[in-house]
Amino acid sequence: KKMHTADPFPPTLNEKTLEKVQKENSCYQMPSRDSRLLTVNENFIKTLFGEDPITVDQIPLTSITQELIAHLCQDNMDGSKQVCKIAQDRLIEKKAEEFSLPIDALVRILKMNDRCASERVPEIIKAILAGLKANAKWEK
């Protein structure tokens, strides 16, 4: 089996699937039922925002992680609130420059235009402001 060290995909993908994903630059949609199962799982979201970025062959998958988070938040206000709360907690705990995934993910979902957008924006702004306030102590 050939290893794909330059690809940001799991090495468990077979050749045919990998070629298809690379050719089509595919986006696979998760059924909403499965999405809801993930969003109610706080531990899953915390894992996505974990201290060590998710990597495959030492390649960080931050953009894929952001897209997964965005997918979980799409038309899902409960999931959006969970993501905002966990991202806010992470931003408060760490210096922003040491840990950018939460802010990047919040910016990514801020750009989403779905039926939850108007309700989601205040949650995102609240999380970002809390992170800025907590990080003000690091400013010189």
Image: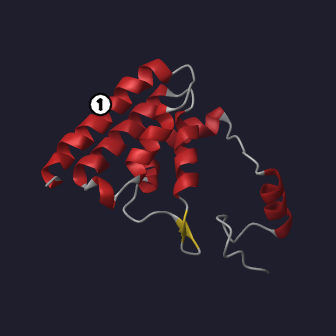
Extreme residue in the right direction: 16
Residue at image coords 35%, 57%: 99
Quadrant in which the N terminus is drawn? bottom right
Image spot of residue 28 (x, y percent): 72, 45
Q: Is residue 28 above or below residue 73?
A: below
Query: Is 92 in front, or is 133?
Result: 133
**Is 25 on the left or on the right of 53, as rendered?**
right
Count numbered badges in the picture: 1
Image spot of residue 49 (x, y percent): 41, 53
Q: Is residue 125 above or below residue 28?
A: above
Extreme residue in the front direction: 140
Residue at image coords 63%, 34%: 33
Q: Is residue 85 above or below residue 56?
A: above
Q: Which residue is mark 1?
A: 126
Image spot of residue 59 (x, y percent): 56, 69
* Image quadrant in which you'd find residue 58: bottom right
Give the residue type that dot 1 points to.
Lys
Residue at image coords 24%, 38%: 130
Residue at image coords 71%, 74%: 4
SS category of the residue bearing label 1: helix
